[in-house]
Structures are given as C-alpha cells and as structure tokens.
Image (spheres, rainbow, N blue to C red):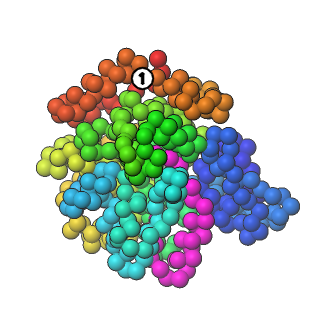
C-alpha cells in the first residue's frame, strides 16, 4: 500500500490511482492546490501494484546514445503560435497521419490546465504554448492504455515525471506509443494559477478570456518572457520582472514539494524525445537565430531516431554534439532551490483575499518599474539577447 509520508516523495502523476484494481485510491487536492493519493483502506487488498508503478520509488535508469538537434519549424504560423521552435507539431502529426491520437496539456473552459487528447491536426493548436501549471491528468493514463490495446498509435506529451508515471503504469513497452517530455523547471500550483487568474481578470473590462499566453513572443521577441491574457474587450500583458505569476514561478515560490527534490533530473529521460528552448541559438548556428523561437531536441531512443528521420523535412535544423546541447542546462540535472519564504507564501495565499495577497507579495515598486523599462528597452534594441546569453537574466527579486 502506497503511503505518502513526505510530500516531496510524490509527483502527483496518478499512476497509483490509475492502476488500483479496487479503485481504493483517489487523488485529492491539498491546501496548496496539489493532488496526492488518498487510500480507502477498507477497499485495499494489499496487491502492491501502487508501490510497483510509483515513478518516485522506481526510477528508470535509461542509457542510450542520444542524438541532438536545434530546430525551427519551417511553417511560420506554427512556430509563431509555439513557445519556441515548434518542435512538437511534426512529431504529433506523424502520429495523426497514421490514424493515432495525441495527448497533451491544454486549458478547459475555466482555464484550468488539464491533459486531453485530439485526433486531428486542426485541433493540435490547443497544445501549443507553455502552461506553467501542473496539469490535471484525471483518467488520462487509462485512456492511453485503452488506445494502445486497440492498436491505435498514441503520442503522449508531458513532464518527465508524468512520462515515467505513464510508462510504469503501462507495465510494458508499446511499439505504438511515442512519448515527448518538455524540459521542466518545476510545476507550479494550480491553486496559485486559479487565484492569479481571478485577480488579473478583476482588473480587466472583459469578462470572457479568449487566450492566455505564458510566453508571448509577439510583444518583444522570443527571449523576453511575457504573460498575456486576452479578453473579449481588452488585454493584460506584463514581463517576467513584473507579472506576479511569473515572479512566483521563476522565484520558486509556487512549486510542488517534489520539485525541490526531483528524482527525474538526468540527461537520458524515459521519453523518446526531450524538447526545450534554445535561447543561445548562435552558439550552434547563427543562421537559425531570428528571435522567433528555436527548440532543442534530444532523442533518447531508437524509435525516436527513426521518427526524426521521417519528420526532419519539416524543420530547418542543425545536428550538434549531445554534450554541447545539454551544457549549462541547469534544469536537466538540478532541482530548483527551496525558497525560504515558500511556507509563508502558501499560508497567506489561503488566508488573504486575492487582491491583497498579490499586491503584498508582488508590489509594483519603483525598482520593478525601472527593471521593466530597462528590459523592454533592451528587448527592442536587441541588447536583451546579449544579456540572455551572458547570464541567466530571468532570475528576479521577488519582494521589496
């Protein structure tokens, strides 16, 4: 029987609840907004399957001669709508062209981040763009298994822990499963996201959200992270130094406890493909650096290699040395550092009203206003690109 004594030892992947033959495990949200398994001991028969499939308890040790690329999708519309270079779409289309389905993170009607699947290329747009929130998986793992057992090809995208949770749940390899993980900084709380969205919407004239962009490239280019919320009447847009949600995320205030002791920080992931941003494009190929977004692709399996050979015609790409691609990528090997103010942050999140809370924790001080002006100016003049290359300029001061 699985038992969560330390919350840092649960990534919330749902593998345990999905595998339980007696439906004795349900996932419940805690006071921070993260879900954890709760066991009904009266239903449990001590079969041990929940422990067997837990990815935190059963870390996969993969070893493979990886291939590494930087890519830009040749379709400018797809790349414009994607967070970086549009690497995921050709992989997904490979599956859809073979009558398959594609799973990924999207928004529901209330802008909660959830996992869902699509069966057509036209619907792939719902997966484009980063979602800096831990997605709700629900019965996704069971749906994947049902498709696989019916010989339907499946592409599943998610965080590294979600991929390992899925593979452990399946308990065997499926030739018709293709997995893609996105390099993960950490997963923020869905509760913080919900309260933040309420807070920002209370200040806007519009009542209906039409679009949310966690990384809006249209404002100041690819290298400057901007949060944008578009409504039926107006829009909100602020950069990484000003927006409360981005400040909480990049300041490691709102992350899941397991992210501070992540068991999935390793070079060779359990997925077929690992994809993530490439801000330092000109370190590899200056011809691909147009500030519209570029992706890194790390191929972790033989299956991934074969698929890339078939889809590479969709990319402008350069093959690079694997170790060169992953050099100085902190997110790959290191967990985020615990913010000493995190406990107080969540305590006040639940006690204060949304307006007072976000204004207290993320005041728009003179210092923040100056930094916003400087960053925007640098982004417009191209100086920001150089700063981004020389240092991790997105680490910010969170409070007064």
Residue 354 vs 50, above or below: the answer is: above
Which residue is label 1 attached to? 364
At horizontal 33% and vertical 64% (from top left) the residue drawn is: 89
Say left or right for 70 vs 64: left
The picture places residue 236, in percent across and down from the top left corner, at 38, 39
Say left or right for 282 vs 348: left
Residue 97 vs 29, above or below: the answer is: below
Is 236 or 57 nearer to us in this picture?
236
- Decide whether residue 140 is among the magenta residues: yes
Q: Circle 1 sits in a helix, a strand or a loop, which is it?
A: loop
The picture places residue 133, in percent across and down from the top left corner, at 50, 47
At horizontal 56% and vertical 26% (from top left) the residue drawn is: 356
- Residue 138 lies in what quarter of the image? bottom right
Is 138 or 95 nearer to us in this picture?
138
At horizontal 63% and vertical 58% (from top left) the residue drawn is: 14
The picture places residue 79, in percent across and down from the top left corner, at 26, 56
Is 276 or 106 nearer to us in this picture?
106
At horizontal 62% and vertical 44% (from top left) the residue drawn is: 33
Q: Residues within 10 Å of mark 1 (few under 14, many from 20)?
A: some
The picture places residue 284, in percent across and down from the top left corner, at 20, 47
- Residue 376 lies in what quarter of the image? top left
Residue found farthest to the right: 42
Residue 305 in view (yes/no): no
- Decide whether residue 198 is among the magenta residues: no
Residue 386 vs 190, above or below: the answer is: above
Residue 210 in view (yes/no): yes
Is 187 or 9 nearer to us in this picture?
187
| Range of magenta residues | 131-156
């Amino acid at each position: 029987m699985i038992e969560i004594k330390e919350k840092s030892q649960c990534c919330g992947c749902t593998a345990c609840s999905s595998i339980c033959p007696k439906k004795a495990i349900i996932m419940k949200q805690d006071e921070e907004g993260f879900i954890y398994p709760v066991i009904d001991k009266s239903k449990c028969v001590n079969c041990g399957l929940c422990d067997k499939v837990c990815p935190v308890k059963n870390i996969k040790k993969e070893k493979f001669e990886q291939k590494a690329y930087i890519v830009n999708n040749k379709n400018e519309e797809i790349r414009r709508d994607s967070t970086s270079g549009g690497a995921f779409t050709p992989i997904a289309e490979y599956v859809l062209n073979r009558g398959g389905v594609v799973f990924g993170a999207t928004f529901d009607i209330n802008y909660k981040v959830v996992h869902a699947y699509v069966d057509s290329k036209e619907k792939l747009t719902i997966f484009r763009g980063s979602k800096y929130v831990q997605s709700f998986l629900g019965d996704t793992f069971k749906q994947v298994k049902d498709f696989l057992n019916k010989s339907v090809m499946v592409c599943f995208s998610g965080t590294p822990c979600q991929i390992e949770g899925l593979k452990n749940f399946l308990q065997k390899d499926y030739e018709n499963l293709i997995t893609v993980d996105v390099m993960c900084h950490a997963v923020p709380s869905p509760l913080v996201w919900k309260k933040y969205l309420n807070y920002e919407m209370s200040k806007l004239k519009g009542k209906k959200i039409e679009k949310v962009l966690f990384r809006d490239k249209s404002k100041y280019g690819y290298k400057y992270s901007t949060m944008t919320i578009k409504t039926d009447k107006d829009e909100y847009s602020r950069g990484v130094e000003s927006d409360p949600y981005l400040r909480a995320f990049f300041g490691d205030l709102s992350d899941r406890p397991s992210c501070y002791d992540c068991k999935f920080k390793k070079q060779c992931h359990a997925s077929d493909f690992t994809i993530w941003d490439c801000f330092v494009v000109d370190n590899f190929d200056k011809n691909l650096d147009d500030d519209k977004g570029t992706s890194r692709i790390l191929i972790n399996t033989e299956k991934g290699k074969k698929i890339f050979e078939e889809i590479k015609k969709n990319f402008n790409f350069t093959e690079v040395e694997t170790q060169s691609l992953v050099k100085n990528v902190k997110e790959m090997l290191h967990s985020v550092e615990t913010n000493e103010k995190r406990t107080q942050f969540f305590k006040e999140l639940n006690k204060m009203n949304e307006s007072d809370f976000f204004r207290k924790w993320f005041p728009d001080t003179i210092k923040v206003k100056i930094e916003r002006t400087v960053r925007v100016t640098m982004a417009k003049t191209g100086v920001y690109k150089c700063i981004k290359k020389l240092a991790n300029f997105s680490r910010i001061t969170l409070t007064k």
